[in-house]
């Protein structure tokens, strides 16, 4: 995710990287939804975002940027 968004090739630990991968998959699933019936995915995304954001300032920044972008694209407030 970091490389995709910021061009950063440095990775986090394996556990965090898995969480970031899951976060990206959920984000993509929400964006791909045509009917907007992804409430469960949004709840899961918010939960994961909270977990990630609480681990470091860097992860908090990444998560907040992603959520703001997702909110703009979906025209729906998605925040933690």
Image (cartoon, helix red, strand yellow):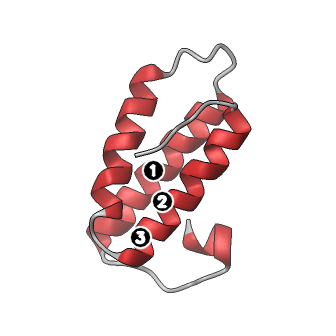
Which residue occupies the foreground of this view, 61 or 19?
61
Query: What residue is pinned by disc 3?
Result: 59
The x, y position of residue 58, in whole percent, is 43, 77
Which residue occupies the foreground of this view, 55 or 5?
55
Q: Secondary structure at mark 3?
A: helix
Front: mark 1 or 2: 2
Query: What residue is pinned by disc 1?
Result: 23
Q: Are marks 1 and 2 in contact (CB under 8 Å)?
A: yes
50 sits to left or right of 77? left
Sooner in the amino-acid sequence: mark 1 or mark 3: 1
Res. 54 mark: none
Does 18 sit above or below residue 57? above
The x, y position of residue 67, in whole percent, is 55, 49
Q: Secondary structure at mark 2?
A: helix
19 sits to left or right of 15? right
Q: Secondary structure at mark 1?
A: helix
39 sits to left or right of 19? right
Q: Are marks 2 and 3 in contact (CB under 8 Å)?
A: yes
Query: What residue is pinned by disc 2?
Result: 63
State the residue at coordinates (66%, 68%). Answer: 5
Which residue occupies the foreground of this view, 63 or 2?
63
* Residue lying farthest to the bottom in this orientation: 10
């Amino acid at each position: 995710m970091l490389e995709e968004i910021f061009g950063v090739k440095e990775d986090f630990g394996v556990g965090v990287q898995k969480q970031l991968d899951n976060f990206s998959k959920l984000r993509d699933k929400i964006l791909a939804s045509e009917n907007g019936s992804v409430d469960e995915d949004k709840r899961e995304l918010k939960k994961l975002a909270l977990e990630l954001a609480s681990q470091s300032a860097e992860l908090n920044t990444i998560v907040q940027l992603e959520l703001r972008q997702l909110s703009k694209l979906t025209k729906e407030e998605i925040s933690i």
